[in-house]
Image (cartoon, helix red, strand yellow):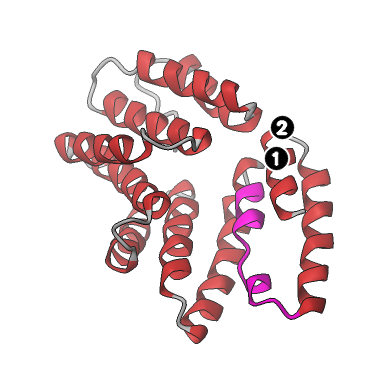
Amino acid sequence: MHALASLYAMKGEFERARTLLDEANDTRRKLGDIGSSVSHHEALVEMYAGRPECAEERLRDDLTALERIGDGSMLATTTAMLAQAVYAQRRAAEAAQLCRASERAAAIDDIVTQVLWRGVQARIAADEGRWEQGRQLARQALELIRPTDLLTHHGDVLLDLAHVLRASGDVYQPTARRALSVYKAKGNAAAAARATAMLEQPPGENACR
């Protein structure tokens, strides 16, 4: 049900997604599963719904629980996701701190986490005029995700790179269109809308902030 909720959120059916999350969480609480303390799917649903503040609230609760049980791997991923939610609320300095914490905690072979923190840090670097660093981070993330079949993450990385290129005044539209194509291949309408918004914004406006 958690995974199904994420899929409905990708289609833009957020209320149906939240209903599934409520049912899933109730079941996991009854089972006493430690996973019930980790709300990655809930955070993903809220991010797609354009409510990063709600995603942040759930992820911060996760951090407390994960620090208590000492789950370093899940902690690294949760911290990277929290960086995304905080950045989306225009708190770049705090997001950068979270990226550094995730980088320190993430295993080398934890591809998703390595990609997540690099994507946020690339955007921050670009926003601050450190364009070469932003390009390097985004392209590192692209190389990490390229061999996988994680289409949504692949699209996210392409959109991160497009953000960096746009901020530095480079041609970004082909990269954003590639992201859009990947999202459409996945059937992720919510993410595709972000790529479309970037392509439709006039020059000079920041499409991802």
Q: Position of residue 24 (x, y in %)?
A: 79, 62
Q: Residues within 10 Å of mark 1 (few under 14, many from 20)?
A: many
Per the picture, the main secondary structure of the magenta-coloured stretch is: helix
Q: In the rendered image of this protein, does residue 149 appear above or below residue 171?
A: below
| Amino acid beneath label 2 | Lys
Query: Is residue 208 among the parts visible in the rendering?
Result: no
Q: Nearer the viewer, mark 1 or mark 2?
A: 1
Residue bearing the label numbered 2: 11
> From the image, which quarter does the C terminus lie in?
top left
Q: Residues within 10 Å of mark 2 (few under 14, many from 20)?
A: some
Quarter of the image for residue 122 reads: top left
Query: Is residue 1 among the parts visible in the rendering?
Result: yes
Query: Could you tell me if the residues under marks 1 and 2 are in contact, i.e. CB atoms within 8 Å?
Result: yes
Q: Which residues are magenta?
A: 32-46
Of residue 203 and residue 59, the one placed in the foreground of this image is 59
Which label belongs to residue 7? 1
Left or right of 139, for residue 92: right
Q: Position of residue 196 (x, y in %)?
A: 53, 19
Disc 1/disc 2 C-alpha distance (Å): 7 Å
Q: Position of residue 91 (x, y in %)?
A: 40, 54
Rendered residue at 29%/61% (across/down): 103
Q: Find numbered disc 1 in the image and state the secondary structure of the residue it sits on.
A: helix
Left or right of 36, for residue 78: left
| Amino acid beneath label 1 | Leu
